[in-house]
Image (cartoon, helix red, strand yellow):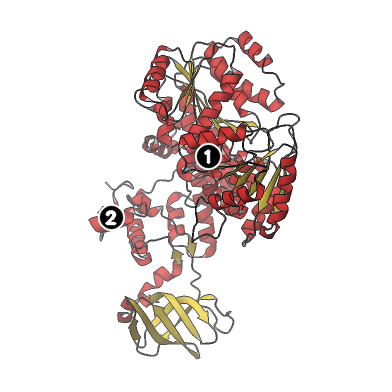
Amino acid sequence: MKSLQDPVAVLKGVGPKRAADLATLGIDTVEDLLTYYPNRYDDVTPADLENVQDRQRITTQGTVVSEPLLSHFGYRRSRLSFRLQVGPRVIMVTFFNQAYLAKRVALGQTVTVMGKWDAQRAQVTANKFLSAGDQEQADSGAVYSVNKHIRQATLRGLIKQAFDEYQNVIPTLLPASLRQHYRLLDRRTMIKALHFPENVGQAKAARRTAAYEEFFLFQLRLQAIRQARRHANGDRILYRNDELKEFIAGIGFELTGAQKRVVNEICRDLREPYQMNRLLQGDVGSGKTIVAAIAIYATITAGYQAALMAPTEILAAQHAEKLSRVFAGTHVHVGLLTGSLTAKQHRELTGAIKRGEINLIIGTHALIQDDVEYANLGLVITDEQHRFGVNQRQLLREKGAHPDVLAMTATPIPRTLALTAYGEMDVSVIDELPAGRKAIETRWLKVDQQSEALHFLRDQLATGAQAYIVSPLIEESEALDVQNATDLYNELVEYFQPHYQVGLLHGRMSAEEKEQAMHKFQRGEYQLLVSTTVIEVGVDNPNATVMLIYNADRFGLAQLHQLRGRVGRGDRQSYCLLLADPKTDDGKQRMKTMVETNDGFVVAQRDMELRGSGDVLGSKQSGMPEFKVGDPVGDLKMLQVARQDAADLLRTPHWDEQDDNQPLVLYLQRHQLETHFD
């Protein structure tokens, strides 16, 4: 019996070599092939040559009136030319590097060619050739994303063969009620109209159905994971409320309204009998660390251990130092576990963790090594969680029986997109900065205004402030004409010494060298720290009030915002200076956005509009899928509707017993093993 899960090798003309070639496009099954949708459609209507523009891409049809002339030049390069009569005109058609077409072109033959029109020479530089027998393909004009292994014509032929042979076993996944409500096509009609549309309107209707189906199925998987977790066993962390209130009262400052709201959401989760799976989003400086500290303290009052995993040793050490101060005088015992420990130190610390003597363990991926055993792990926190791979986060979770999970990120993601990328998680947002925090003033200067920036810097240093100076590269690069950190360091040493001391920090230094440079800056021995983006996370110096970024247009918006967040952490007015001469509109827009707003969520929204959601989130790490048809930015309203529809369906009593929903039940069963519980 035929099934869409049949391997593509069942199709005629697909042997082991071609199956391997198709796999490079992510096509392994017949369903993969049928859902490998075109990324655009060529306009295959023959153009009126009297009305087309020079350099315009056109389709034209005519009769071959000269023998094809094939000439070779260079290594495997060729030119094929012939004359084509189109109505009363005779034009020249030229194909480059498609020598095989010479055998298909014959005098008197009617052909269709597609390419770029050269009005002056009355010539089409063509890239697509269709003879009369190919006219069925010309009707669709479907263009697919291919690579060096698979040609367009090969892919089209296989899709046609697969549809002809398997169209009767294509199940419609969307329930009839949703299809009727939104006027969507059944799946077989949708797939046919996407690959072989009879007109533009049919293709648009099919793409609309495909986009909704993608969003709905993705959200259904996420909502099913979320629902399954809600019913999974978890430890109820019955913290001591009086102790927790006393700890919060002794912090020394009033929590913001947003922090209080988020703390309540987390504490409510801790007491529930299922595993917490919550994402804590907060802009740079919004106070996520103290929220995490409260969650840690609550967990420890209930007799459990807590673990905090950071992506770098610098950040892990900073967390350990800061939290040791926060928990001074309490029964929280902090241990820092990183790869820099000696064998003896590692052995002693892991022993104390196993015995439960250390109840807050902070570290890098060293936390998930095989020899690290926990006495009673109740809470797992990952900081900058998008920097960890799926497996790393899962391994840490598996170190305990059923630990609650809190993922923190200072990389703002528009809330609507966070609900998509992290749809199986509960999302908490700290959208309010602590009282008294002054907005960072951002200025964009052209590169020839460097001296103005350095004068400003000198004035700030004279008041006792410190500054970061960031360069995109460590060493000389012929590919990029940008200032590099080592040259910049030498230049600034000459400019500022002997009055001010300059330090250097970059990714190729050893962990010990980085730590030493950072500590000297924090202790005030360095007034300026020249750095690469190592300081994006990890360095916390309230006395630093200026961030000067060279070649700022080389950085993305999110990265610029993260860098800016290294200043403005004290009571003094802080500044971010962007030195850049962007050549592109996007580059100019990034600079303008930085000057206009300090709000990380506004920055993230602009970043997403400029770059697209996949690039912003990083599809592999964030869990954000690369949708085949749907655009999470352009189709945001549809995405939100699909999310609500999926949640509503799963909340319907006995939904999985209804006949109309059986294809969805099978779909979820098939994808359950493929879905990362992360």
Q: In the image, residue 110 lies at what x, y percent?
A: 40, 82
**Along the line of sight, which residue is nearer the eye, 57 or 397?**
397
Give left or right: position of 575 versus 194: right
Q: Residue at x 47, y 76 (%)?
A: 115
Identity of the residue furthest to the front in this view: 498
Tell me the quarter of the picture where residue 77 sits: bottom left
Amino acid residing under circle 1: Ala
* Label 2: element kind: helix
Q: Is residue 560 left or right of residue 509?
A: right
Q: Quadrant of the C terminus?
A: top left
Which is more toward the observer, 20 or 413?
413
* Residue at the extreme left: 15
Residue where numbered disc 2 is placed? 19
Q: Is residue 581 among the parts visible in the rendering?
A: yes
Front label number (2 vs 1): 1
In the foreground, 462 or 605: 462
Which amino acid is tagged 2? Ala
* Marks 2 and 1, the one that precedes in the sequence: 2
From where the camera sits, is residue 383 visible?
Answer: no
Residue at 34% x, 25% y is 370
Q: For mark 1, give the secondary structure.
A: helix
Residue 403, labelled with which disc? none
* Residue identifier under label 1: 421
- Is 64 drawn above or below residue 544 in the view shown? below
Residue drawn at x 66%, y 25% as measured from the top left: 259
Q: Please tell me which residue lies in front, 457 or 470.
A: 457
- How would you rate the neighbour count of disc 2 (Cα within 10 Å): few for under 14, some for 14-19, many for 20 or more? some
Residue at 38% in and 77% down: 132
